[in-house]
Image (cartoon, grey):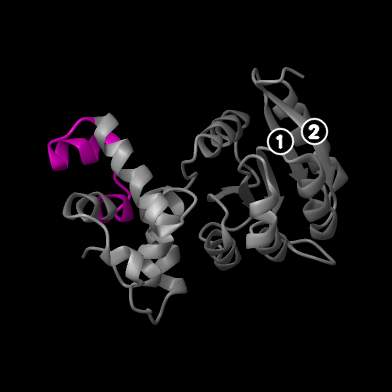
Amino acid sequence: MSTSDIKVLLVDDQDLFREGVAVIVGAQDGMSVIGSAADGFEAVRLVDELEPDVVLMDIRMPEMDGVEATRQIFSPDRVARRSSPVRVVVLTTFNLDDRAATAIRYGASGFLLKDTTPVMLRDAIRTVHAGNAVLAPADLSVLMDQQFQAVTPAPAPYLELTEKEREVFDAVARGMSNAEIAGLVFASESTVKTHVGAILRKLALRDRVQIVVFAHEHGLVPR
């Protein structure tokens, strides 16, 4: 394994599935499987111990499922102890899975169907490692709409965003890419990235997925 490889942890209660995914991931350039777990308890322990870059997390497992494991992985005390960020991709057999939506609220970067192709799996790992979502904006919006029947007022840090940052925030909440946002706000992509970084920092959010969740949670999604 190269020191620059994306470190992947596999979590699934089916040995055969884990072994199959391990073969697929291990065959890709620039990524390596550093461990595997059969339940959520073991997953949380290995994340603490191995500090993977990306966790492929089965949503339905005995003992502790993937939702609870994701919640614990992103608990503030654990996040504070890490030397680098970890990304979680939930694996499910159901499209627009309500449990997957809950895991996304807890910090997962999206979900994949378990019958996804090797190419899509590879691309998903690279995508979340870069801090982006592995879920179509429309699907994420549907999931979040189902999750938040009631909203809470926007916290003070949101009110401190500049006018331009609010404009970029709204565009990210709608699922727009940096290139699309650049055209919308008449700025370069690098400037948009700077604004997104400032938004994440001011709102204490991890990535763009969490901006979408935040927007739905506080009723800030443009209609």
In what quadrant of the picture does the N terminus appear?
Answer: top right
Q: Quadrant of the C terminus?
A: bottom left
Left or right: 10 as drawn, with respect to 147: right
Principal SS element in the magenta part? helix
Residue 133 in view in this figure? yes
**148 left or right, relative to 220:** right
Q: Residue furthest left?
A: 186
- Determine the secondary structure under disc 2: strand
| Residue 216, image quadrant | bottom left
Measure the C-alpha gap from mark 1 to mark 2. Answer: 6 Å
- List x then y, in percent, for residue 110: 53, 51
Query: What crowding class fits label 1: few (fewer than 14 Cα within 10 Å), some (14-19), or many (20 or more)?
Result: many
Q: Is residue 4 above or below residue 162?
A: above
Q: Is residue 177 magenta?
A: yes
Relative depth, front residue between 2 and 108: 2
Q: In this orientation, which residue lies closer to the viewer: 182 or 99? A: 182
The residue that disc 1 covers is: 8
Q: Residue at x 36, y 54 (%)?
A: 138
Find residue 3 and report its image quarter: top right
x, y (%) of residue 187? 17, 34
Circle 1: element type: strand
Q: Is residue 115 left or right of residue 202?
A: right
Tell me the amino acid under the disc marked 1: Val
Asked if the residue under mark 2 is in contact with the one under mark 1, i.e. CB atoms within 8 Å, the reply is yes
Amino acid type shown at disc 2: Ile
Q: Is residue 216 magenta?
A: no
| Residues shaded magenta | 170-188
Q: Which residue is mark 2?
A: 34
Left or right? Give the position of 56 relative to 204.
right
Residue shown at 70% from the left, 56% from the top: 78
